[in-house]
Image: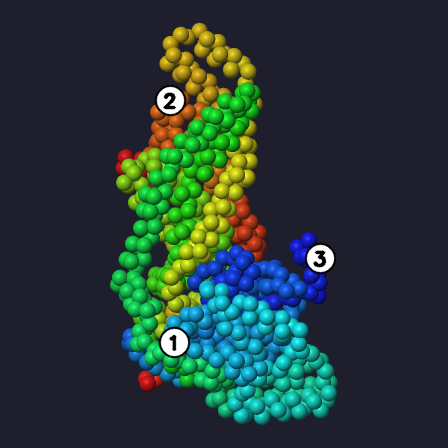
Amino acid sequence: MSNIEDMEGKACPVIANHIKVALVGQPNVGKSMLINSVSNAHLHVGNFSGVTVDKTEVLFDYKDYHFTVVDLPGTYAFTDYTIEERVTHDYLCAEEYDIIINVADSTNLEKNLQLTSELLTMNKKIVIALNMSDEAQKEGIEINADYMSELIGVDCVKVSAATKSGIEELIDAVLRNHENEKEQAKLIFSEPVEEEIAQIVWYLDKHKYEAKNSHRNIAINLLKNNKKTYTKLHDNPIWTELQPILVEANKHIELHHDSDDIKEAFAEEYASFNRGVVTEVVKQKKELEKKTLTEKIDNVLIHPFLGIPIFLFFMWGLFQLTFEIGAVPMDYIDAFFGWFGDVVGATIPNEDVRSLVVDGIIAGVGAVILFVPNIIILFIGIALLESTGYMSRVAFLLDGFFHKFGLHGQSFIPLVTGFGCSIPAYMSARILKNDRDRLLTLFIIGFMSCGARLPVYVLFAGAFFSPEMAGNVLFLIYIAGALLGLIAAKILKLTAFKGADEPFVMEMPKYRLPSVKLVWHTVLTKTTMYIKKAGTFIAAASMLIWFLSNYPHNIALEEEYGMKIEKTIDEKEKRDLQNQLSTALLEQSYLGTIGKFSEPIFAPLGFDWKMSVALQTGLAAKEVVVSTLGVLYALGEDVDEESNTLINAISKNISFPSAIAFIVVIMIYLPCLAASIVFTREAGSIKYFFYLLFFTSVAAYVMAFIAYNITKMIV
Amino acid sequence: MKTLIECKKACRVKVLKLNAATELKQRLISFGIMKGAEIEVLEHAPRKSTIEIKVGKMRIALRAEEAKLIEVEKI
């Protein structure tokens, strides 16, 4: 085994046998779900092509064996057309593994066999998992798995990842195949092709050509113009004699198929083989309904006129819910952290430490936790969009519109994922096969406001608009961001990414009821990630910001005000002096120095130094913007019994035009440090990061300047 | 010659020829759109910019530019 060393620490030392399984299948056949039910592992599952953009490994033990299952990105055919296909293709051809599990959708077997039949010519053991067998049964489709196994010479097992049936049989079949010698798969072509195969096999036999793969498979691969097989044989002395035979054979096959493309000819060969298998093993018991449920739903959802309004309504509803329901627990969370800060603060005698804990950590983290309810609702919405299959419909509806801006309909999928978080969005941009399209999409994903920016918006919308309006404002912010993104795309397409348009060919998956467990799981993982970030990264950033805003101490200033405060008797005046002191202290702190230093740059946008600082700390992560504001306004704020919440502090201290300009900057500039790293990786070069930094910064500044001045004129 | 984009909604056709370049042709074939395949037109997006078709049991969205490359005959 190749990877025993890797296993150390992970595997139980008693188990000595390892099996490495490559999980292969077309997109949207339930590979990830199958792997979840096999191992109880937790992978992200969605109902649109391209969820698994990278290979994922899952480890588990079963009967004396240690399993490593590699979940490969879905691929329609065994080609290297898109990045995902390339990942799968290269893995299957070059990596070490023991056996392939080919996952097929039982409800659409013929289509799925297209990939299967191509896999059969590889020199690998294969087990076919006929997934979604429960769904097939409901549709009256009966597959004779035993007959199918016999017919194609590969074990076929009926499974259902959803009901977890057949899983054990599948693993047993994998074990059985692993322990036994590989059986020759029975892939039969039309007579002319078989003739040519026989001739080449005869030739290879005659020269006792040595290879791991069978001579028949080598012959098929040669006829298919498989590059790898060609290179291998090219250096062999028999090549000189073999080449003319191949040329003749290809001519013969092409003539037979009335095509000048041997790949097309073979595609037809595979298709007729698959049709043959399906005719033999599949029985359609129930009469096929004239219109499937999916088509009935599609009649409404992708209606030429109603489709887009319905989509906009869904999105509007989502943002309304995000705000309305999300606002309910906010007061409680806010009150809790206020109380928690007081309680904890009372136990700490040292003033500096108390300030660090209460004003630094608790205020900073609390400001981020406050938005957990909103985040949860938004993530539920996106998870529903993904898992029902509606996402592809929207890509269909929007392609015409997107195309005008130089984008691809499928760009919609990474873009909408961007509303959740930019990181998976950057990664899912891999479904775009053309590098230019992909780069263009990568550049504008940042315009789709991610979940981390939501707190900033909620904060400002809450501070400047009535609760009834806030949801609409939120929706407007998101739409405005998306529109700006489209305009940016058009500009980039006309300047930096000129070139021919890419074709748009996309599967529209069946509608599926979202599994509660799945949605729950996705939302849980993402929310935990958010909270974890709040507990670690944000807490650390809050501490840093607290430090920067409290030091250096200015003893002279403290003494001066201390004297003044002692002299006054009036309570109100005392409080005013106290506030003046904290403001003065804050202004001469490190953070104040940074803020003052950069203030002139941001002055044309109407930002005070606190806002300037918040924007700069926001480069690390957008949540930090809120926590920075929380720390800054908690320290320098008017200490007043009723108005100690951040929302009030903001509506009091920031003018409306400045707030609008601030939102615009947040909307456009770099999402966060982590996303920038992923962006650089996905774009393939650091130079693109600097382009992005320049592009977004300039765009943010210019747009904010315009927004500030327009709002000032109106208000 | 009739192409797929000229077909009306609910029309059933058979593919005669793919006039696409190699890469796109492979792509179409991998979706089951190949010579002899039967296609049903399900829906048009506004202004026919995109169409939804059904090949076998799979529903596929195609842009008009691609649909124009698929020669079909009515069945």
Quick one: SS at disc 2? loop
Q: What label sits on residue A13 in the rendered view?
A: 3
Judge left or right: residue A594 versus residue A8. left
First in sequence: mark 3 vs mark 1: 3
First in sequence: mark 3 vs mark 2: 3
* Residue designated by label 1: A140
Q: Is residue A228 above or below residue A588?
A: below
In three-dimensional space, the C-alpha distance between marks 1 and 2, rounded to whole angstroms, equals 70 Å
Query: Which residue shows up at 64% across the image and 65% down it?
Result: A63
Question: Marks 3 and 2: same chain?
Answer: yes
In three-dimensional space, the C-alpha distance between marks 3 and 2, rounded to whole angstroms, equals 64 Å
Quick one: SS at disc 3? loop
* Residue designated by label 2: A640
In three-dimensional space, the C-alpha distance between marks 3 and 1, rounded to whole angstroms, equals 47 Å
The residue mark sitting in front, 3 or 2, is 3
x and y, in percent, of residue B58 in the image:
40, 73
Q: Tell me, what colour scheme is on the image?
A: rainbow
First in sequence: mark 1 vs mark 2: 1
Q: What label sits on residue B49 in the rendered view?
A: none
x and y, in percent, of residue A293 in the image:
32, 69
User: Which amino acid lies under the numbered mark 2 shown in the image of this protein?
Assistant: Asp
Q: Is residue B6 visible?
A: no
Q: How many marks?
A: 3
